[in-house]
Image (cartoon, rainbow, N blue to C red):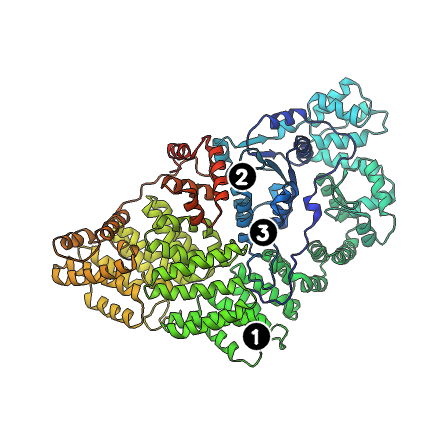
Amino acid sequence: MLPGNDLFSAPPLNPLKLAPPGENGPGVERSAIAATWAGSRAAVTLVCAPAGFGKTTAMRQLLVAARQHGVPAGWLNLDSADNDLGRITPYLWAALHTALPSLGEAPSTGQWIDASRGLPGGSARQLLDVLSRVETPYVLFVDEFELVKDSSVLSLFSELAFSLGPGQRLVLGSRHKPGLPLGRLRVQQRLLEIDAPMLRFSAGEVRDYITGCRGIGMADADLGELQARTEGWPAALQLAASALAGRTDSRAWLQQLSGTTGNLAEYLAEDVLSRLSEPHRRFVLRSSIFEAICPQLCDAAFGSADSADWIAQSVSGNLFLLPIETEGDWYRYHPLFRQFLRAQLSRTAAQELAGLHVRAANWLASTARYAQAIAHASAAGDTALTADLLERCGMDYVRGGQMALVVQWADTLPHAELERRPAVLAATAYAMVFLHRYAAAERLLGALEKHPGASHEEDVTVLRVMLSAWLDRMDDAVLAARTALAGAGPASPFVSGLLHNAVAYGDMLQGRFVPARHALLQAKRELESINAIYGLTYSACIEGMIDMLQGNVRDGLARFSAMLNRIVASGQRYTSSGPVACTLLAEALYELGDSGAADALLSDYLPLIRDTCLPDHLIVAHRLASRIAWLSGDAGKALDQLNTLQELGDARGIARLGMAAAVDRSRLALLAGDVSSARHALAVAASLAPPSGTLMRYSDDLDDSDDLDDLEIASFRIALVAPDEEADVERVEAALRLAESSGRARRAVRLAWLLAQAHHAAGRSAQAQIWLERALAQGQAWQALRILADEPWHLQPLLASLASRHHVFDPRYLERLIQAAQASSQRGTHVRGEQEGLLSPRELQIIRRVADGHSNKALARLLFVSENTVETHLRRINGKLGTGNRMQAVARAREIGLL
């Protein structure tokens, strides 16, 4: 949704994160580990041990072995900033691109950025989608995985792990067990674990390393003593070898070697450091402030010209400085040794640190390494420099999807420093909106509005409309849009289209459908001129929503489907455009009885819908997902979806989300025969209802998503089922007349259907027949099912009474309606098994549709993919299930509980 006039390039990636460590001379071949890995068919390998156990070295040797056998391999080094889906996804894509050039590079953002390609969840979903079509074997190595704590990042790696096909492997290096579903991976025999005991050096490996690799002569007894005292800990052995180099009293020295591993490492590191010359020791200590070093960076930070010489001496002296396999002379210290050096530097030269960090920040900024530059500026405590750098690059990082990083940087600035910089305020406000931190975004927007000048006027307008809409304050959003359109200054085509869409949305909610369509024409005229897919998606979908409200379900379906096809064709399937079209297309498909197709779309898009869509769409999507789960027999999942909706409302401060969740929870309770729980849920919903008029409640007191399921309809349901209540027919008739007068034909049919059931329950058969035939006539004309079948409270006797009379209804339509209503009435019994996760979400969609009898061509049309893509997925499914064709795959999936 961000306005912009220039083509945008994502912030450059740090190539050091994509480079495996190089070799500093010969090392010990971990042949036992290599043999174990080569003999395993596990898709995921976890190399897990504390610091200093040689995890990275072992992984590097596996990387070399894979490449020697012709298997493409990529490498990714993680850091703490990677707990941000927007940051890690482009790096993950780049690492995989190294192994698989045919994968293509991560898509860049176009001229009119709309949080689309910069959308973190969308980029991740697009990457997984591309990988799902890859059949080539490959290996991805990810080091320092213990730094990952963020649930969305862990979820990305989890989905990647379960989606790997035959010959495709993921190798993770971690100091402790990561938050991945390791139990399920073990059960499915997809996990190989290489732990600390396997990484300890054997007696033979100690001999090979000390006497062979380091050229230190030692008696066998002394080698045995060294192994015993270090317990084969690779880091201690490496430190000991450096300390032993040049000594003639190795036995006496060994006698002094004792203590825990931590104390032992510090003792050995001190011994190694004390033997350096003062200038060399000073260089080593000061260079430890960097994650990685090169001569130019060190010269700039230290004000020297001899850094290349000191680096060369450190490498030749085995000072735990390893080359990085990338362009330029870059090196990295062993993490354990760097930790020791930094502690020493803080004790002995703390006064130098700020100046070193500032000079490093300036050099890094001059090479466009802004993330590292800002880290050093913050470490120096130089808030002015941090703000200067953020002013230069903040919006680029927001456009690149790294919102959390921008907020993290802004949080280090004093309030006064932040408020005097409009560019930083705007970038941080956008980031806060996309992270759903609305209260913080409002504060920042308020500060931005105090800055006069046209340079950020569009940002203020867009932020005000976005924030109001996502906060479910559509009256504020429409007012802001109308005010901006009435202003003197011309808006850019993107912003003008956005504003006209907002006005149209407001007119639609007021039941003013003709003015709404007129505003949409103006919006499309502006947006088509720049091919702004995001804005055009809203234009098309608002028009389709009007169709749906008026009962023209098939017209709405056609608009949503055409728009989603256009989105996919433009390469923006997993942008913030796709979830909007998907939600409404799923609603139309569900209404017409194709809950399988609706489920396929929601399974693909629901995480993105949560990240990018308006409250109306959130309600529709979660309600549909819940009802589809109930129809498939999974009552637990049905409730999970409603709980998620309520949690979103709680987290974002949007009461209507919780209200909608409670309304549908009441309906589920009625379906389960629990009137008491249904009443309780309705009371909760009523307690969350906002005062009339505060949430765009217009002529018929409704928002779009509440059209068929508001508090009034929920209370009427309970009255139909509860033995101690009688429905207030007059009240429902009044609501029906109001719906008809405002052009909400679907709502009118839902109310007529409920009225028919109310009259039947009260013994008024003649009135019941009148309302029944009226609702059925409209439902049949639309070929709509769920508007009737989702209210099955007295359906069977009503239709039975219809059978005894002459009528004009199509028996096939009536049969479909009866079957749909029976599915609604059935109690969920699905049990989730331990094989869950064996197939990826997309593969599950496909096997379910195959089980329903869909052809490859039908599957391609349903999932908006090519037939070749469907065939690729089927081959992967057969590979995972150990089957040879479609029918065998379906049978095996049923056998293990996936169907």
Q: Residue at x 19, y 60 (%)?
A: 772
- Dot 2: what SS? helix
Task: Tell me the quarter of the picture where residue 207 sits.
Answer: top right
Percent across and percent down for residue 585 are: 41, 56
Observer-nearest residue: 59 or 877? 877
Asked whether residue 432 is in view, the answer is yes
Q: In this picture, is 762 found above or below 324?
A: below
Q: Amino acid at mark 1?
A: Ala
Q: Which residue is mark 1?
A: 491
Task: Tell me the quarter of the picture where residue 198 sits.
Answer: top right
Q: Earlier in the sequence, mark 3 or mark 1?
A: 3
Q: Amino acid at mark 3?
A: Asp
Q: Residue at x 53, y 72 (%)?
A: 496
Q: Residue 161: which numbered mark, if any? A: 2
Q: Quadrant of the N terminus?
A: bottom right
Q: Earlier in the sequence, mark 2 or mark 1?
A: 2
Q: Nearer the viewer, mark 2 or mark 3?
A: 2
Q: Which residue is mark 3?
A: 84
In-image side of 8 versus 752 (left or right)? right
Percent across and percent down for residue 184 are: 48, 35
Q: Amino acid at mark 2?
A: Ala
Percent across and percent down for residue 270 are: 78, 37
